[in-house]
Amino acid sequence: MLILWQTSLLRRTKLTVRDEVSNGLSYYDYTFLTEVPRLYQMVERQVRDYAPALADQDIASFLRLGSWIGGDRDGHPNVTPGVTLDTLRAQRAAISAVYREAVAFLREHLTQSTDDLPPAGALRAAIAQQRDGDTLRFPGELYSEMLDIIWEKLGADSYGSGDDLLADLRQTRQISIILITHDISTSSDLADEVLVMYAGQLVEHSLSTTGYTKPLHPYAHGLMSSVPTLREDKKLEFIPGQPPSLINPPTGCRFAARCPRRFDRCDQEPPTFTVGNHGELVKCWLHAKG
Ligand code: SF4
């Protein structure tokens, strides 16, 4: 607030087109570059959910962003060919920096040892080809090694096209990550599938397209309803009571003592898994068929 108060309303120097370009690009990080991938991810999940036969196919590009800043060559005296070229370079550098940061994050976290998780031969071949006899920086951690190669290539601006970058990134996609967390918001951004545990047992397994928004198990429902979101104005709920003792667990459903939908059968026998309408697995008598 103090900085804002001490800042002049007007700058005394005239802005150049290059200033406009960098000003425009400064918004991208927290607008298009975060929301557009999220949009594609949502579409991918919906396709996978409602048209599983198409699940392995890439979603064709359906959104194209354009900006006239630095490219309005219709008589603007300060927008020269050199300025337009600089603008294109600045845009390319901005996108590269975003990818590079994301790749560095993955490089730090995909550290699975080759001994425990032998990678596919294609990944080994790609690394051998690209390192071309050079010493590996992450021997024994080939996912990190491949990501390091991508990170270096992005830094050297040596990708000829987005397809080349995608081809390298695909080498690192043959891996699954299990994220065990109480942070529902973060997991909803990352997960493709959701497994909800209660009192040492799996109670629901669903795709993330439905698991976060339409959970079936009453515990999963209570859990998701306790998470605040920015996108809707909802009343937060909580789950009263305590988890049961695992030394002497209840005879019937382990969630019964806290469940708002409990009925007689719940106390008599432990629920078994039922398959829901979207292929979910849920351990709750409410959804039992028969
Ligand atoms: S089995 Fe019964 S007590 Fe358990 S979660 Fe379902 S409705 Fe609630």
Image (spheres, rainbow, N blue to C red):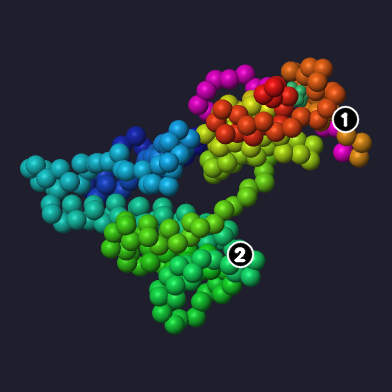
Magenta run includes residue 235? yes
Drawn side of residue 171 relative to residue 217, left or right: left
Drawn side of residue 161 relative to residue 113, left or right: left
Drawn side of residue 244 relative to residue 48, left or right: right
Toward which corner of the image does residue 273 lie, by quadrant? top right
Q: Amino acid at mark 1?
A: Thr
254 over 103 or under it: above or below: above
Q: Label 1: how many residues lie within 10 Å, few (<14), some (14-19) or many (20+)?
A: few
Give the mark, 1 or 2, whose residue is nearer the N terminus.
2
**Is residue 65 in sight in this rendering?**
no
x and y, in percent, of residue 77 in the image: 10, 46
Tell me the residue at 72%/39% (across/down). Answer: 202
Nearer to us in this view, 97 or 289: 289
Nearer to us in this view, 199 or 98: 199
Tell me the residue at 48%/56% (across/down). Answer: 173
**CB atoms at circles 1 and 2 under 8 Å apart?**
no
178 over 189 or under it: above or below: below
- Which residue is disc 2 drawn over? 117
State the CA–CA distance, disc 1 to disc 2: 39 Å
Q: Check disc 2 and report its element: helix, strand or loop.
A: loop
x and y, in percent, of residue 101 in the image: 46, 56
Ligand 1 located in image quadrant: top right
**Is residue 177 in sight in this rendering?**
yes
